[in-house]
């Protein structure tokens, strides 16, 4: 099974409260990235998610956390050999009611996606935000404002000054 097929099937189980985020979402916005899993943000209780998955024959488990900076829960599972995670949309900065459809998949709108990446603020997340800034220059202000709000502006600026990233995503540098 292809990653996009797994994503579509999992999204169908969480429709309309779920949207695709993570590497697949970034790729659909033009960020070149390798990913092997499916990440979804949902406006559902973890028990509802695990029940829907169970009803479809998909085993999953909930990881809960009360650590500062962690999401309160994440549903983890595997669907036909493909790992997936479902995250609480509101904690991840995502509103499933605001979405786009690309390649037949419900994905987070680009602003929510950028916000979610700034909330997470890992190296790969900031790489993705920087790539989106370069691909969509009209979003650079929003990217910087979001990064500033979530205390990761320095990481973003570092990625934006990376020559390899500029060569990959700036049209005039190609």
Image (tube, rainbow, N blue to C red):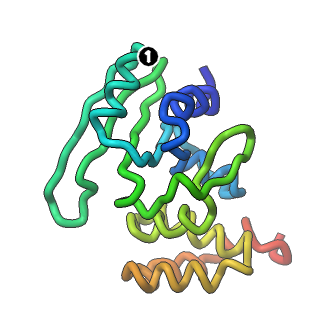
Does residue 146 lie above or below 22 as drawn? below
Q: Which residue occupies 74% across, 41% down? A: 103
Q: From the viewer's perspective, is 52 left or right of 115?
A: left
* Furthest residue toward left: 66
Does residue 154 lie above or below 110 as drawn? below
Residue 67 location in percent, x, y? 15, 60
Q: Which residue occupies 70% across, 47% down? A: 101
- Name the one closer to the observer, 68 or 163: 68
Q: Could you classify mark 1 by the number of other residues whose Cα lies within 10 Å: few (under 14), some (14-19), or many (20 or more)?
A: few
Residue 10 location in percent, x, y? 51, 30
Q: Quadrant of residue 85?
A: top left
* Furthest residue toward top: 57
Does residue 34 lie above or below 6 as drawn? below
Q: Which residue occupies 39% across, 24% down? A: 53
Q: From the viewer's perspective, is 88 left or right of 22?
A: left
Quarter holding the N terminus?
top right
- Name the one closer to the observer, 114 or 126: 114
Residue 114 location in percent, x, y? 54, 67
Q: Quadrant of residue 89?
A: bottom left
Total count of labels:
1
Does residue 150 lie above or below 49 as drawn? below
Task: Name the residue carrying label 1.
Answer: 56
Quarter holding the C terminus?
bottom right
Residue 95 location in percent, x, y? 50, 58
Q: Secondary structure at mark 1?
A: loop
């Amino acid at each position: 099974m292809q990653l996009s097929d797994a994503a579509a099937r999992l999204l169908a189980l969480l429709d309309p409260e779920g949207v695709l985020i993570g590497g697949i979402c970034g790729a659909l916005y033009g960020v070149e990235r390798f990913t092997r899993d499916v990440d979804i943000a949902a406006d559902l209780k973890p028990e509802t998610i695990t029940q829907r998955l169970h009803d479809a024959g998909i085993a999953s488990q909930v990881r809960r956390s009360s650590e500062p900076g962690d999401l309160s829960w994440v549903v983890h599972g595997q669907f036909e050999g493909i790992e997936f995670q479902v995250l609480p949309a509101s904690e991840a900065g995502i509103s499933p009611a605001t979405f786009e459809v690309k390649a037949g998949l419900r994905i987070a709108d680009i602003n929510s996606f950028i916000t979610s990446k700034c909330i997470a603020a890992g190296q790969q997340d900031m790489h993705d935000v920087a790539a989106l800034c370069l691909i969509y220059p009209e979003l650079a202000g929003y990217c910087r404002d979001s990064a500033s709000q979530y205390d990761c502006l320095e990481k973003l600026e570092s990625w934006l000054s990376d020559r390899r990233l500029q060569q990959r995503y700036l049209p005039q540098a190609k």
